[in-house]
Amino acid sequence: MIRLPPQESLTGIERYALDLLIDLARIPPVDDPSGDVVRLLLAERDAGASDLRACMARDWYLERGDGTVSVPRAVLRRLGQVATAAAERGTTSRDRYDRVPSRENEVVQAGLAADPVVSRAATRLRAAVIASAGRRPVALATPWPKGKRWAVAFTHDLDIVAYWPAFTLLRVAELARKGEVRRLGRTALAAVSAIGRDPVARAVRRVLDDERAHGIVSTWFVLCGTPTLATMRAGDLTYRPESRATQAILHALTERGSEVGLHGSFATADRPQLFQEQRGRLERLIGQPVPGVRQHFLRMRAGATRQGMTAAGFRYDSTCGFFDRNGFRAGVADVMPLWDASTERSIGLDEAPFCWMDRTLSKYAGVEDPAAWVADGSALAEACRQVEGLWVGVWHPNLSPPLGYPGAPEGFRSLLSRIVAQDPFLGPLRTMVEWRAARRSLRVRRLSPDGRLEAHAGVPPTAAQPLALEDPGHRVIATVNR
């Protein structure tokens, strides 16, 4: 628990960063003015706050007192800039898909892309609160349901359904350019054996079977526009959502209880009104709501695109991640509310950032060994586990031998085993977002003299996954059902 200072004097980005930091630290604010709890103070000093590595080395310039923790406003601004990718908003640099290159990102420039720096700052704040409490009571929100200390969501982008031989030929050309003769030969043999067998649908079912063996329910992002020759040549819309093959895949997903989200086409980045059309089309096909979206090729314009997502009724986005390297683009290994620089307020849309994607290494770094992909994903999962956060990974089901990826299915199974062995909370993205929205709304209304807590959640949790408060030793001391 913590008593926050008056925030009227804070700028919009400072308020956003403070709220985000408190949320990630799992420290619920106390409304009761009479309770003797740790107080958060704001300091005006700004020495060194512009240097991320200096901030980390100096424990984010947090100062501990008797029942107080002081944080510089300059540090809040710095954390807010990282979490909102302020440096990327200020650049005109674009790649051929109209995306901001990762080199424009602050954590990349600081050499910290693989470190969730904002989430790690929150852990330091939590440690400072505990150390400063003395005899004062300390209550923290439990990190995830079912007593789990971190969480994992496996997600998949359905980029290919039809015309798979064309994609195999493109992949063969890629392997030839790299001199991957052995993989090219294995691909050719697998492709010939797959003729007439629909290898894409088989790959989808294999992924679902592998996940079910570990009790995993995943999230699948599906394209839902009308393909043209131009969109297919660009690698954008490549299949009709109403086709028999697509319908069979959608049926398999819904039958297994998978979450289905929209994979927004290239055009939605510039014409956000298309989100409503594509979302409605997908909902009619699957007969259930579509709460989440991820942009195809991660193509978006941060302000307009996300406003379009909000207007279309999406609950969350999962586009925030690097396309050419793996890591934490916003410095956060968790669900986070999105902030709009033009209005200086949250926009009502949550971000579930991914930190690892299969094709990032093979396509951009030239690493073709699936074992190396797995090692990279496992290392980032460990970083998420250390901050009690959320690991979100992207695996494309078309990474199968007939489409040019021999050894990839075995790699995926290895990744599942290695991550699940670390005992995370598992679920689709909608579950993670719903849980975090409820946890973020948690407040301590009153603290009795005998130490009893009266807590309230502005966003009611589900009955199956109630919120709880714990002491620093992880002992549950209160349950919050509403």
Image (tube, rainbow, N blue to C red):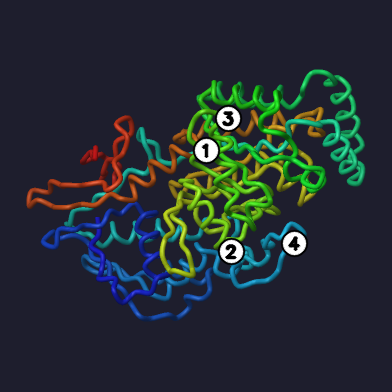
What residue sits 47% from the left and 48% below the top? 386
Is disc 4 in contact with disc 2, using a CB cutoff of under 8 Å? no
Disc 1 to disc 4, C-alpha distance = 29 Å
Q: Tag on residue 95?
A: 4
Is disc 3 in contact with disc 4, using a CB cutoff of under 8 Å? no
Residue 405 percent coordinates (x, y)? 79, 34
Disc 1 to disc 2, C-alpha distance = 23 Å
User: Between disc 4 and disc 2, whose residue precedes?
Assistant: 4
Q: How many neighbours does mark 4 have within 10 angstroms: few (below 14), some (14-19), or many (20 or more)?
A: few
**Which residue carries the number 1 mark?**
153
Viewer-nearest of discs 1 and 3: 3
Residue 194 percent coordinates (x, y)? 83, 21
Element under label 4? loop
Q: Tag on residue 371?
A: none
User: Between disc 1 and disc 3, whose residue precedes?
Assistant: 1
User: Between disc 3 and disc 4, whose residue precedes?
Assistant: 4
Viewer-nearest of discs 3 and 2: 3
Q: How many neighbours does mark 2 have within 10 angstroms: few (below 14), some (14-19), or many (20 or more)?
A: many
Is the residue 479 above or below the residue 102 in the image?
above
Disc 3 to disc 4, C-alpha distance = 34 Å
- Whether residue 87 sits left or right of residue 59 in the image: it is right
Element under label 3? helix
Closer to the camera in the image, 155 or 1: 155
Is the residue 451 above or below the residue 253 in the image?
below
Q: How many neighbours does mark 1 have within 10 angstroms: few (below 14), some (14-19), or many (20 or more)?
A: many
* Residue type marked 2: Val
* Residue type marked 4: Asp
Q: Tag on residue 285?
A: 3
Disc 3 to disc 2, C-alpha distance = 40 Å
**Which residue carries the number 2 mark?**
107
User: Between disc 1 and disc 4, whose residue precedes?
Assistant: 4
